[in-house]
Amino acid sequence: MPTDSAAASAHRTIPVLRMRPGDHAYADYDDDEGRWEILVAFIHEGLARGEKVTVMADPAVPPADVHERVHGHHGGAEPALRRGQLSYTSMRELIAPDARFTAARQLGRLQEETATARQQGYTGFRTVIDMAWVADLGMDIEGVMHRETHAHALFAGRDYAEICTYDRRRFHPEVLDAMREGHPVALLDRLGALHVERAEGWLGLVGDADVTTRAQLLAALPAALDGAAGGDGRLTVDLTGLSFLGSDCAVSLLDAARALPPGGPRVEIRCLRFHARVLGMLGARSVPQLTVTTVEDA
């Protein structure tokens, strides 16, 4: 297990499709594609998991326009809206009848909504909140930052998940940096992206490892193996943050381990069960200096 800050950061970074109840995530965007891509994926994953989903989009965007975006990507949004599993609201509506935001009021309302969702038979409750509401309500950013870093009790029961999305064009870089660090989880800003992090004896992959991102993997592997050879002779390749492992990237991992000289570094691949099956079908068991360790998904 890595111990330095880079590795710790990698373990906090996940793709949106790996969001689970109890996660409180930071996300940002700087264009419309980024704005909607993460939001829509988060919504439909929640609906598929039997959770109740509330969307607090940019207050400047009418709910009908938000729904058009959501429904356009997946036909399941319309029946979910009709049966009450999916709803669109705003921070103003959430904290009503109070006109002024307070962290206590917001947290209390979200706890109420989480309890109601569970009573209604949903497996959990999730929200996506576009932080454009801060300017809409005239809030001071310090108060918002305090809420973002002191909301642990809301997530402790692991019935609730939340993404706070920040438009990088509206917030100062220092605020964005503080918010990213203040959230327990940070999301990759695009579907299909791959995030690679290295620490001593450790290589972590987060996102999608496929033909479009294979070059990143190939660029990182030699240095990681060289580092292991010069260290304690072991390299852990952590795939538990992957949403997808393509056969081309899986073959690249196995080929790199297969090419190690006798007595060279030993490689452990830590991965989820379905990734282990892919590696097994491609011959992982026949690689002498390779161990595949299966980790249960959360």
Image (cartoon, rainbow, N blue to C red):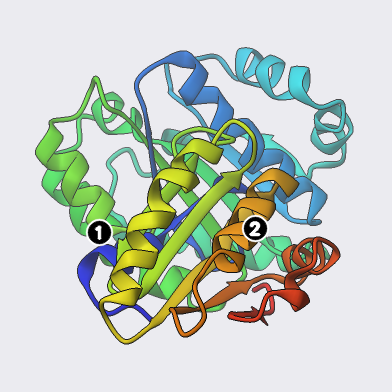
Q: From the image, which quarter does the C terminus lie in?
A: bottom right
Where does label 1 land, which residue? 182
- State left or right for residue 218 relative to residue 19: left
Question: Which of the 4 image quarters holds residue 234?
Answer: bottom left
Vertical comparison of 248 with 171: above or below: below
27 relative to 254, above or below:
above
Horizontal side of residue 274 vs 25, given as left or right: right
Q: Quadrant of residue 283?
A: bottom right
Image coordinates for residue 297, horizontal then vertical, percent: 68, 72
**In the image, which disc is placed on residue 107?**
none
Please tell me which residue lies in front, 35 or 212.
212
Q: Nearer the viewer, residue 161 or 142?
A: 161
Amino acid type assigned to the residue bearing label 2 in the image: Phe
Residue 193: % across, % down: 51, 37
- What is the secondary structure assignment of the residue under circle 1? helix
Q: Could you tell me if residue 73 is visible in this image?
A: yes
Q: Nearer the viewer, mark 2 or mark 1?
A: 1
Task: Look at 50% across and 63% down and name the residue there.
Answer: 23
Could you tell whether 170 is left or right of 44 in the image? left
Q: Is 114 rendered above or below residue 67?
A: below
Residue 113 makes an appearance in the image: no
**Which residue: 80% across, 69% down?**
280
Name which residue lies at 23% across and 56% down.
Answer: 181
| Image location (x, y in percent) of residue 118 | 73, 68
Q: Residues within 10 Å of mark 2 (few under 14, many from 20)?
A: many
Q: What residue is pinned by disc 2?
A: 125
Q: Are marks 2 and 1 in contact (CB under 8 Å)?
A: no
Specify few, some or many for label 1: CA neighbours under 10 Å numbering under 14, 14-19, or 20 or more. Answer: some
